[in-house]
């Protein structure tokens, strides 16, 4: 039926049983993303299959790294600019609807990454088979772009797996393993990667019916009455996590599902209209921008090779131990050094917990544990391709460590520091080969925070920087190169915000009120809770290091808490009492009225320092600054980053608000250099 036809992105093959295998291999791309051209070809293929139906149709990928990563986001952004989003959504819906209506069994054969539009294509098929490989991850993450699934995902998934499981996947955007997908009914059967197509053919020959419990749940949770009862509950749960004015997509998804009836066509119309409306919001524009910022960070290494197999970490505290554990998790051989085994053992225990959580099976956990070795004597240094210093923040102690460590290192090995604030121009003076010395500044908690600052200095070799960028990519971290000035990027920008919060607290503003003001702006965590989380001792230490550089004083009360042994979450008490890893925030008198300018007092110092960092070229450009602050601090992603927020709000207006605060509270609010830059007005 395809004789004489040639497709650019799809390969077609038919076996002796009359089963057609459609293989997606998007031309000129390392991954399969669904562009208009890919969908147009699929539409033509499906049209021909409908005329002369085969015994069955299997959809698979030719890419070794995954099934389909989703829609072509660059193209989708273009649809938004020219106002054709709804047309693009309806076109994709039509293609998948025709695929779903083929009068023969259709099976999606999933191996590796299956995201967004790829999952929606799979949902349009009658059945799905997935490989058990750990790389197989299935998701509908569109909420992270400020929209929700618009090619039939929100219309189909609740009717397949039941509303609670479907909405949880779509509202969070989380990825499901193959096993998890099978458990909820998203996938019908599992197999090994090498048997994927054969298992799909078996489903064509002998389609599986879903268990009665799954079918009953799917029906019962999607009745009109169930939707009217469940929707308000979901709205309340969602509102406890995000504000509707900041992130409208989850609320629009719930409402679209609530209104959707038994007709698939009707549900698709509601879906397309709602997603097209969301795509026009500033939130979607900014979250799509954040997606591209993330892709840029991932691509900074280019094609460079890191050449690192063995990592040696000195310092088994919270940061050093967790850096070592993450390196071992990602496949590197790691030796972890500290003065005595009693300092190393807690790090090994935390590592085991991390491996158990991430790797699931006992065999894979055992392999990761075998890659991480205690090394009190430092015998791993001569074999290491990278040595990371992660001891306490004291320049003299670090320099003494470099003098002892560097002579033992092999030629070509990199030496890195995890310092959070000490200028590298100061530290590099002790190093004999400064070209291979740099900063790798991770953030706490290492397993959760995606950013790593690659800290430069004036004698760093470009090749060493490229190796460090490639190493971060191998760790599944997002690197941003920064100048080695005090505080680098993230801590320099964050410190005025945190110190002003501590100052407001010392003036009598309740901690929960301060935290609420920051969260109202869009920060993921309030600054008082943040100080407790990073540690009051750390905040005071970094504040003392950066204070003279930034012209800031440590607020009263912070040092006293530290001296009293109240260091925050790690000790169970700081500004708040902590129980089971959560702050016990005190009740605030209902009659208390927060200061009108509290949000400005917190946020404007952060924006002020971001402008100064751009002016001082701490990073190469504004986009990298926004990326670093978003992924390093969680700065309100829906605002697109601090510099994007300055541009959107108006630099002159924000500068005037800073000047008003300076006249009221003092010079710490004076506008920093850079507010008159044309870069803030583009």
Image (cartoon, rainbow, N blue to C red):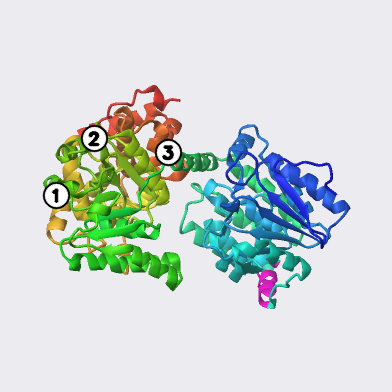
Q: Which mark is residue 235?
A: none
Categorize mark 2 by other alpha carbons within 10 Å: few (<14), some (14-19), many (20+).
few
Q: Are marks 1 and 2 in contact (CB under 8 Å)?
A: no
Q: Is residue 65 magenta?
A: no
Distance between the Cα atoms at labels 1 and 2?
Answer: 51 Å
Relative to residue 651, is residue 671 drawn left or right?
left
Front-lying residue, 79 or 553: 79
Q: Position of residue 65 (x, y in %)?
A: 56, 52
Residue 572 visible in the snapshot: no
Q: Position of residue 325 (x, y in %)?
A: 33, 60
Q: Which mark is residue 404?
A: 1
| Residue corresponding to mark 2 | 664
Q: Specify the farthest residue to the bottom.
A: 212
Say which residue appears at 26% left-offset and 50% top-offset. Answer: 387
Ranked by sequence position, the earlier of labels 1 and 3 is 3
Say which residue appears at 75% left-offset and 69% top-offset. Answer: 207
Q: Position of residue 660 (x, y in %)?
A: 29, 31
Ranked by sequence position, the earlier of labels 1 and 2 is 1
Q: Which mark is residue 300?
A: 3
Residue 214 lies, with reference to residue 647, above or below; the image says: below
Look at the image and give the residue range highlighted in magenta: 213-223
Q: Are marks 1 and 3 in contact (CB under 8 Å)?
A: no
Give the structural element (helix, strand or loop) at label 2: helix
């Amino acid at each position: 039926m395809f004789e004489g036809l040639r497709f650019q992105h799809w390969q077609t093959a038919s076996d002796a049983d009359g089963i057609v295998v459609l293989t997606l291999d998007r031309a000129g791309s390392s991954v399969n993303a669904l562009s208009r051209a890919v969908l147009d070809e699929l539409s033509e293929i499906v049209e021909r299959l409908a005329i002369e139906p085969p015994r069955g149709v299997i959809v698979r990928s030719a890419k070794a790294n995954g099934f389909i990563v989703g829609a072509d986001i660059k193209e989708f952004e273009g649809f938004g600019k020219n106002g054709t989003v709804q047309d693009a959504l309806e076109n994709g819906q039509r293609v998948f609807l025709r695929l779903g209506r083929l009068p023969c069994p259709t099976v999606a054969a999933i191996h590796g990454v299956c995201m967004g539009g790829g999952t929606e294509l799979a949902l349009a098929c009658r059945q799905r088979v997935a490989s058990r490989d750990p790389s197989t991850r299935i998701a509908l993450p569109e909420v992270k772009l400020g929209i929700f699934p618009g090619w039939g995902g929100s219309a189909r998934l609740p009717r397949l797996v039941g509303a609670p499981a479907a909405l949880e996947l779509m509202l969070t955007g989380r990825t499901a393993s193959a096993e998890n997908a099978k458990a909820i009914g998203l996938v019908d059967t599992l197999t090994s990667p090498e048997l994927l197509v054969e298992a799909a053919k078996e489903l064509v020959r002998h389609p599986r019916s879903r268990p009665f419990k799954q079918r009953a749940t799917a029906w019962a949770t999607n009745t009109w009455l169930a939707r009217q009862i469940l929707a308000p509950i979901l709205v309340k749960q969602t509102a406890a996590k995000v504000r509707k004015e900041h992130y409208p997509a989850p609320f629009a998804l719930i409402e679209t599902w609530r209104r959707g009836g038994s007709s698939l066509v009707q549900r698709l119309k509601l879906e397309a209209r709602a997603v097209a409306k969301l795509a026009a919001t500033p939130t979607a524009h900014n979250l799509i921008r954040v997606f591209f910022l993330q892709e840029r960070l991932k691509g900074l290494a280019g094609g460079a090779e890191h050449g690192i197999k063995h990592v040696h970490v000195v310092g088994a505290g919270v940061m050093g131990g967790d850096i070592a554990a993450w390196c071992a998790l990602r496949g590197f051989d790691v030796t972890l050094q500290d003065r005595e085994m009693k300092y190393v053992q807690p790090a090994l225990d935390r590592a085991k917990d991390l491996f158990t959580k991430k790797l699931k099976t006992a065999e894979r956990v055992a392999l990761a544990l075998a890659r991480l070795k205690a090394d009190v004597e430092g015998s791993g240094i001569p074999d290491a391709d990278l040595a990371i210093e992660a001891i306490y923040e004291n320049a003299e102690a670090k320099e003494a460590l470099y003098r002892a460590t560097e002579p033992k290192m092999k030629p070509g090995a990199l030496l890195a520091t995890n310092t959070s604030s000490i200028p590298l121009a100061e530290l590099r003076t002790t190093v004999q080969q400064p070209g291979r010395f740099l900063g790798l500044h991770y953030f706490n908690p290492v397993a959760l925070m995606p950013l790593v600052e690659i800290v430069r200095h004036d004698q760093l070799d470009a090749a060493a920087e490229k190796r460090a960028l490639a190493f971060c990519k191998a760790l599944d971290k997002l690197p941003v190169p920064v100048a080695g000035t005090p505080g680098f990027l993230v801590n320099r920008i964050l410190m005025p915000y945190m110190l002003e919060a501590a100052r407001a607290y010392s003036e009598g503003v309740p901690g929960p009120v301060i935290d609420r003001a920051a969260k109202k702006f869009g920060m993921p965590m309030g600054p008082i809770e943040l100080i407790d989380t990073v540690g009051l001792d750390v905040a005071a230490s970094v504040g003392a290091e950066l204070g003279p550089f930034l012209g800031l004083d440590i607020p009263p009360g912070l040092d006293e808490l530290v001296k009293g042994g109240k260091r925050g979450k790690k000790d169970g008490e700081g500004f708040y009492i902590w129980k089971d890893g959560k702050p016990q925030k005190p009740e605030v008198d209902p009659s208390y009225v927060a200061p009108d300018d509290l949000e400005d007092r917190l946020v404007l110092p952060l924006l002020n320092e971001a402008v100064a960092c751009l002016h001082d070229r701490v990073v190469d450009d504004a986009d990298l600054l926004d990326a670093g602050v978003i992924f390093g601090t969680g700065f309100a992603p829906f605002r697109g980053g601090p510099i994007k927020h300055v541009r959107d709000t108006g630099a002159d207006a924000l500068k005037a608000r800073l000047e008003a605060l300076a006249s009221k509270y003092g010079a710490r609010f004076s506008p920093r250099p850079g507010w008159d830059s044309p870069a803030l007005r583009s």
